[in-house]
Image: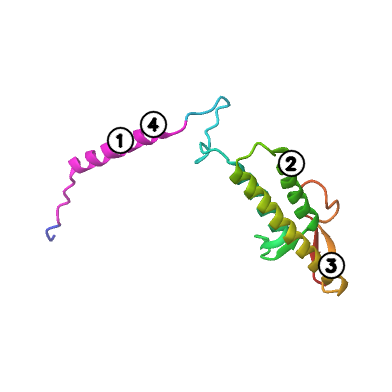
Amino acid sequence: MPDEPKLIIDTDWKSQAQAEKDRLDQAAAAKKPKPSVAGEVPAAGEDEKVRFEDVVALLASQSLSYLGYFPDPRTGQAVVSLEYAKLHIDMLGVMEEKTKGNLTETESAALTRTLSELRMAFVEVQAAVSKAVQEGRIKPRTMGGPGAGGIGSAGPGLSTP
């Protein structure tokens, strides 16, 4: 039998690696957020506060989505629902009205500018949809099957013939 190479295991290296792993685990445990009263651990980044601009951006992106600016992630096609776009724009209008005098100049200007741009986009899309419907290029339809328009449905939309 030929001489087989001897395998030499450096046990000192193993113990150093295990000690390093234990030290990192302890450091991670120290940084881990403590459970809340309900026993839940907040998600990563949850300790950052949600700002007013974040709420405005959320509602604005929903409005733009329903105006057809973003494709549906499931189908890859844009969905236009003027009713839902108007709903989200109107929610921003309510926020503007109810927060008047309570916002910083920057927040107020950003909300006013966002609302103005969304309202202009809504009018443009509404005009384009009306023209396309009159020309017969698209027809209004209700998405979601029976009971569409209720909670949990995609709501009204448009389709090509």
Amino acid at the residue labelled 1 = Arg
Disc with the residue nearer the chain's start (3 vs 1)? 1
Q: Nearer the viewer, mark 1 or mark 2?
A: 2
| Secondary structure state at the residue bearing disc 2 | helix
The quadrant of the image that shows the N terminus is bottom left
- Circle 2 packing at 10 Å, graded few (<14), some (14-19), many (20+), is few
Return the residue at label 2. Answer: 97
Amino acid at the residue labelled 2 = Glu
Return the residue at label 4. Answer: 30
Give me the C-alpha separation between circle 4 and circle 1: 11 Å
Return the residue at label 1. Answer: 23
Position of residue 69 in the picture relative to residue 2 (left or right): right
Is 20 contained in the magenta span?
yes
Return the residue at label 3. Answer: 130
Give me the C-alpha separation between circle 3 and circle 1: 66 Å
Disc with the residue nearer the chain's start (3 vs 2)? 2
Amino acid at the residue labelled 3 = Ser
- Circle 1 packing at 10 Å, graded few (<14), some (14-19), many (20+), is few
Q: Which residues are magenta?
A: 5-33
